[in-house]
Image (cartoon, rainbow, N blue to C red):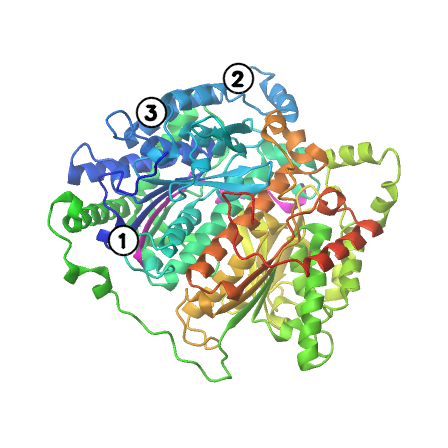
Amino acid sequence: MSFKEEPRSPLQPPTYGNLITILSIDGGGVRGIIPSVILEFLESELQKLDGENARLADYFDVMAGTSTGGLVTGMLATPNEQNRPVFAAKDVKDFYLEHCPKIFPHDDNLLAPATKVVKALSGPRYDGEHLHKIIEEKLQKRRLHETLTNVVIPTFDIKYMQPMIFSSYQKNSSLDAKLSDICIGTSAAPTYLPSHSFQIEDSEGNLLREFNLIDGAVAANNPTLVAISEVTNEITRGSPNFFPIKPTEYGRFLVLSLGTGSQKFQERYDATKSSNWGILGWLAGEGSTPLVDVFTQASGDMVDYHISTVFQALHSEENYLRIQDDNLSGDLASLDLATKENLENLVKVGEELLKKPVTRVNLGTGITEPYYHTTNEMALKKFAKILHHEKNVREARSPSTNKGPFNRSDSIEDRIAQELRSPLQPPTYGNLITILSIDGRGVRGIIPSVVLEFLESELQELDGENARLADYFDVMAGTSTGGLVTAMLTTPNEENHANVVAMNWKIVNYVIRHLKYPCFWCNICSNPLAPATKVVKALSGPKHNGEHLHKVIREKLQERRLNEELTNVVIPTFDIKYLQPTIFSSYELKKNPSLDAKLSDICIRTSAAPTYLPSHSFQTEDPEGKLLRDFNLIDGGVAANNPTLVAISEVTKEITSGSPNFFPIKPTEYSRFLVLSMGTGSLEFQEKYDATKSSNWGILGWLAGGGSTPLVDVFTQASGDMVDYHISIVFQALHSQDNYLRIQDDTLSGDLASMDLATEENLENLVKVSEDLLKKPVNHTIRLRTRWL
């Protein structure tokens, strides 16, 4: 099998142009019809400029898509017999209108709702047969290397518990799957469609690779950052297809990111109701699938937040266009309601979205707001002209188009100013920005606590026994159990020193064992009926009542508030009322005093893992007792189980705002960052699940299969891996890999992998895992396309 390096579409490589062009399409089931309307409009504008044969694949260097977006990407980039796209953009909408009712058949029978619930409990809602048939028919036997432009399609392998990214840039024959298999895999949404397994063989029939895939949305429902990371990696490797550019010079990227709609502003859920939800509530409450909703919404929002931060920091916000409707409600918000009426209404949503103003993320609130008076339609017309101009520039410079030799006087090198890095600042400002980040995952928080004990002891050997971690890190970030550890290490006592010493890990042990998981729960574990009791309880409500957790956190952190921490802290949570991440950040307090909550409330809520602990609501008030803000929060792990990228984004925003606390630095000069990222262990290499078994799972299987909670496992594992993947690429691209240290044990199995097994034996074994981890070699590179680090 050969992988040709020459251009595969009329678009010449970026090396002959000025920009790198990226199209990204979110996942969202039948709501994929919304971006199809947007793409039809964009392609029609390009056809006005370049003729009726113009296709989107002729203009974008990369097309990325997840789930339903991956299917659209496949249709727009797969060649027909004439080596042109199988689908024009206008054909995609018709595809949805014709085939969605057969993929997601709707039953009008009065008993249908009850039948649907019973079926969803025991297996996927739909058999996927028509989806498989029509995808295989349309994409035939075309493979990844044959696409007309580069494509990036995320999936998730449940056997090895890691994201699997199918990318044209990866010249690896074991990943050169049929596009039909990739599209079926990235669309296999848990509880909706069966998992998908397939194999790749060489020309002699020898097995190269086996895949056990589910929906890519669990890893990256918004694949924009994945696409940017793939391009960054290609630039770093020295690909001749790119002009000389710094890997983080995102001002040279032109990005169009299309959402599939959300119900963010509909006050979808609230903490009072969800605090009593068990498995059934989280996967079938309010006539929807709340757990899937919050994970996918959080994933997309965190990507948009980070990219918006970077592009605004570089004063290149015009180069990033995100088109999304956050006002869906009722039937329009459904992933699988494929009635003729609903599909036609979704088309109208897409058409009306074109007339709405462009929105951008307010970096202070995290909420999207209208931007000037430009509509999405106007912005797309401008976008089309830029794409048209870029294509013509490349053709004029490329020798292969015979439109004139490449003029070196116009080369990118001559037009890019080689700016010098800032000179060394006085010692009072320092040379580095130091960040500590701690993942979430229940009782496994004891693993980073032991590693932090070791680090603090080393600092004490250098600076005396009073040295504390909060004295050395500019930012400490934590999610879920990591947020709890962060607060304990940064909350001041009466002497204004850290409330908890890292080396006294037994305190952390005490907190984890006795806070989250009440003593009565440990007692019934030895009862022969405990497993059955646990299942019944988990179906009807959270596994643990959280009372002891609330009591001890309030006892330890008292009335201290976010503004009182000894160093800057960043703790992600997720608001289920507005379906958006809420980040409690020391940097935001001056601009947004409503975030100055009690640390106990923040920690209780970032730890409120769905199905494990109840949701929590609270309010913040001003000094006169007036309501500032109402919060309805759950575990921050649904937004950022690995909060490292959130912490970097918060610092980037602060630098961009001109804070005097930072030395002069470019916002993306990550080589000036020193980052320690602490994992809580994973079971990545244990072949945990497989597609054959999971293809028959319904609600119960996805939330209680394999003696664990598979849906929670895959979302949180995917979230952490995608963050590590992006940061690793950036730091390696800057030749600064020694400035980023990720410490994680990917070999947990059995009881050690549990989030809530708080027996004395298991906690002591987790301590041993940590001590062994200190002796293991450092891993610098994460390779999502293989199962080896």
Using a 10 Å C-alpha cutoff, classify the residue at mark 3 as few (fewer than 14 neighbours), some (14 to 19) or many (20 or more): few
> What residue is at 58 percent from the left and 54 percent from the top?
642
Q: Are marks 1 and 2 in contact (CB under 8 Å)?
A: no
The reply, left or right, for residue 400 in relation to residue 197 is left
Is residue 645 depicted above or below 384 in this figure?
A: below
Q: Residue 420 at what x, y percent from top left?
A: 33, 74
Q: Earlier in the sequence, mark 2 or mark 3?
A: 3
Q: CA distance from mark 2 to mark 3?
A: 22 Å
219 sits to left or right of 668: right
Badge 1 or badge 2: first in the primary sequence:
1
SS of the residue under disc 3: helix
Q: Label 1, label 3: how many angstroms apart (C-alpha)?
A: 32 Å
Q: Which residues are magenta?
A: 252-273
Say which quarter of the image contains residue 94. Answer: top left
Residue 601 visible? The answer is no
- In percent of width and height, residue 134 lies at 41, 21
Indicate the amino acid at tag 1.
Leu
In the image, residue 747 lies at what x, y percent?
67, 47
Kindly identify which residue carries mark 2: 107
- Which mark is drawn over residue 94? 3
Residue 256 forms part of the magenta stretch: yes
Instruction: Relative to 184, say whether 611 is above or below.
Output: below
Amino acid, disc 3: Asp
* Dot 2 amino acid type: Asp
For residue 122, say whether it is visible: yes
